[in-house]
Image (spheres, grey):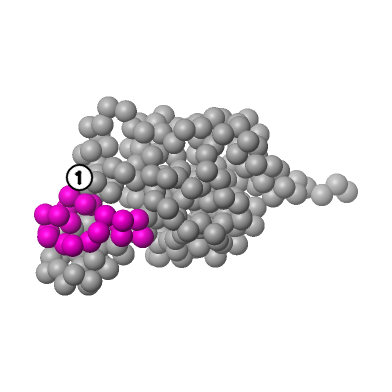
Amino acid sequence: MTPMKISSAVIFDMDGVLADTEPIYMAITRDMLAKLEVPLAPEELFAYVGIPTRQTWTEIISRFDLHLPLNELIRLEKDRQLQHLRDIERLPEVPGVRKLLEELAQMGTAMAVASSSSLDIVGLILSKLAIRRFFAATVSGRDVAQGKPAPDIFLKAAAEIRTQPQKCIVIEDSPAGIAGAKSAGMVCVGFANPNSGKLNLAGADLILHDFSIESRMKIKRLVSETST
């Protein structure tokens, strides 16, 4: 009897991989920190890329001894992000990623989004970019007990699209996301987006600097190799 073929799936981080939104978030956070008179150097903010908002503000509150409610800071930042994303005329899309989505869809590859952002921000961005149709599932940081670098969000995404973790390829632009994907037992592609900062992506199985034809071929080759 011929063995049944098990197709692989691709799980995408959103910010910095699908949408080039990290500069937007950085500007909002820098403005908040300036108003709070928090002396955090701009380059230090890159260490929080891919980290859940609650964890980020918890660490900042502790480090700088802020006497402000955690939930209030989280709410304020999220409200400002949502407002900016709603108002922006053209949301920046990572070059080449739409072509990758189209090519993976043509291959019959299941796809999901696993983002630390809230579900309403995820929904807004996917809708504004008009790419929601490519994804069979979307998982946000609020949907799991522990955010990146824990594997929870990736394992939930795999369960949502009914794919075994070892058959999943994750595309991530942050060390926390890469660590979470590897902890989940998944193949991980590190996407070196310069707008996400010069981050250490050494834990990834493959590092790409763009979604050019050559890079897309490498991802599709991984998809084929991960299928059995």
Judging depth in this view, the residue of 120 and 89 nearest the camera is: 89
**Residue reaching furthest right?**
1
Q: Is residue 105 visible?
A: no
**Residue reaching furthest top?**
89
- Magenta span contains residue 30: yes
Q: Is residue 166 left or right of residue 22?
A: right
Please tell me whether residue 151 is drawn above or below residue 129 in the rendered image: below
Res 75 → quadrant? bottom left
Judging depth in this view, the residue of 127 and 97 nearest the camera is: 97
Q: Residue at x 54, y 30 (%)?
A: 99
Q: Residue at x 17, y 53 (%)?
A: 32
- Magenta span contains residue 112: no
Report the residue marked by disc 1. 80
How many marks overall?
A: 1
- What secondary structure do most residues of the magenta stretch adopt? helix
Identity, as a three-letter code, of the amino acid under mark 1: Arg
Q: Secondary structure at mark 1?
A: helix
Q: Residue at x 33, y 37 (%)?
A: 124
Give the percent coordinates (x, y) of residue 127.
37, 33
Neighbor class of circle 1 (other Cα within 10 Å; few <14, some 14-19, many 20+) is some
Give the percent coordinates (x, y) of residue 26.
28, 49
Q: Is residue 9 left or right of residue 120?
A: right
Q: Is residue 195 left or right of residue 60?
A: right
Res 20 → quadrant? top left
Give the percent coordinates (x, y) of residue 36.
12, 59
Q: Residue at x 15, y 65 (%)?
A: 69
The stretch in magenta equals: 29-47
Q: Is residue 51 left or right of residue 188?
A: left
Q: Is residue 19 visible?
A: yes
Give the percent coordinates (x, y) of residue 115.
41, 50
